[in-house]
Amino acid sequence: MKFVFVFILLLHAGIHFIGFVKAFQLAEIHQLTQSISKPLGILWLVATLMFLFSVVLFLVKKDWWLVITLISVIISQFLIIVYWKDTKVGTIANILILFVGLSAYGNFKFNTIVQKESEQILQNIPFENLSKVSENDIAQLPEIVQKWMKISGVIGKEQVVAVCIKQIGNMRTKPGGKWLSFEASQSFNLQKPAFVWVTKVDAMPLIKMVGRDKLYKGEGEMLIKLASLIPVVNEGKNSKINQGAMIRFLAETCWFPSAALNSYISWEAIDSNSARATLTIEGKSVSGVFSFSDQGNIVSFEANRYYGGENDSKLEKWLVKNNSYKTFNGIIIPNKSSVTWKLKNGDFKWLELEIIDVRYN
């Protein structure tokens, strides 16, 4: 997308330079049949130089490249209208440049919001003098959860209070829908349970979809925008979205096992290979069942979760399956997982993800 956009800007700049050449009769330009005065010829040159300047600013990632680009488009479209007979096709390029420019501005605003939210959930976390997890710390947990703690490698390591994770994978938005590739990053506060998840999805050729999922003080928010401009989903701070965000946090504790020791999670043994976990935040509780292998690795997580955040959304079974495991910073966690809605009319597997990087504390 980046290089296609640069190519369009350079090509557009070159075409505008032809108008300058025509006005000052520097060469024969048969494509432009209308005569161009020298004052307007200078304006064609100004448009050329501004488009070139916007390319430079875009490539060096200066935020105000958009302002220069918009001014260039305005000048360009004025000239196209004046010489409409020969130049009307240039309107298509201006519309495309304008769309990409507005999309870039939307992406800038989106990233600014996400950065502030990530800083908000991570502020005031004390990283000094963190206690190390001991066998005494896990003694009160169900036996299979203790086995998970031991095999994961957290014993003897610092209690994790903050996590940053990078993910890649594929998702789809409806049963039978097309699989879309995505990349994402996620920040967690494990002292006061919260997260911000940010993703970019390849929605269609040259157009990405951005999304943010959030849990803060027991309240969830979900925002998805096409091309960073058009809201597709904007739900938050209702009981169903809150419940879904809390369920998600609980499921994702498999990536930071020492979080299972925090007082906001309680455990109840079900059998020798499963245990129910209950997460409580701000007086609200959700629960789900972790299933383990005989060795102690988490095999799956299942919970009843609202399928959407609308008034008529119903509770459905939500299943996370872990397919492989990898060591990050000395801790073994599931690194490849899939997520499936167990709907009445059939299973809807909507997410396949892989953890590619983890930073603790």
Image: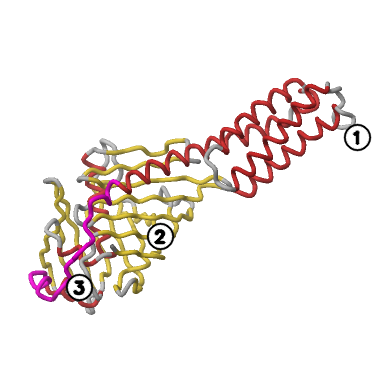
Secondary structure of the residue carrying numbered label 2: strand
Q: Residue most toward the right?
A: 28
Height in image: 251 above or below 77? below
Residue drawn at x 60%, y 47% is 59
Q: Which residue is mark 1?
A: 27
Q: Is residue 135 visible?
A: yes
Q: Which numbered disc covers residue 167?
A: 2
Mark 2 burial class by Cα count in 10 Å: few <14, some 14-19, many 20+: some
Q: Nearer the viewer, residue 227 or 102?
A: 102
What amino acid is labelled 1 in the image?
Answer: Ala
- Between the C-alphas of marks 3 and 2, the distance is 23 Å
- Precedes in sequence: disc 1 or disc 2: 1
Left or right: where 271 falls relative to 327: left
- Viewer-proximal residue, 257 or 222? 257
Q: Main secondary structure of the magenta part?
A: loop
Q: Which mark is residue 149?
A: 3
Note whether 280 is above or below 35 in the view shown. below
Whether the residues at callouts 3 and 1 have beta carbons within 8 Å, the answer is: no
Q: Residue furthest front?
A: 128
Cα distance between the residues tagged 3 and 1: 77 Å
Confirm whether residue 1 shows in the render: no
Of mark 3 and mark 2, the one earlier in the sequence is: 3
Q: Which residue type does callout 2 highlight?
A: Gln
Q: Quadrant of residue 140?
A: bottom left
Q: Name the one closer to the observer, 340 or 198.
A: 198
| Numbered range of the magenta stretch | 120-142
Considering the image in quadrants, where does the C terminus appear? bottom left
Who comes first in sequence, dot 3 or dot 1?
1
Query: In the image shown, does 328 or 340 lie closer to the viewer?
Result: 328
Residue 245 drawn at (x, y percent): 26, 49
Q: Amino acid at mark 3?
A: Met
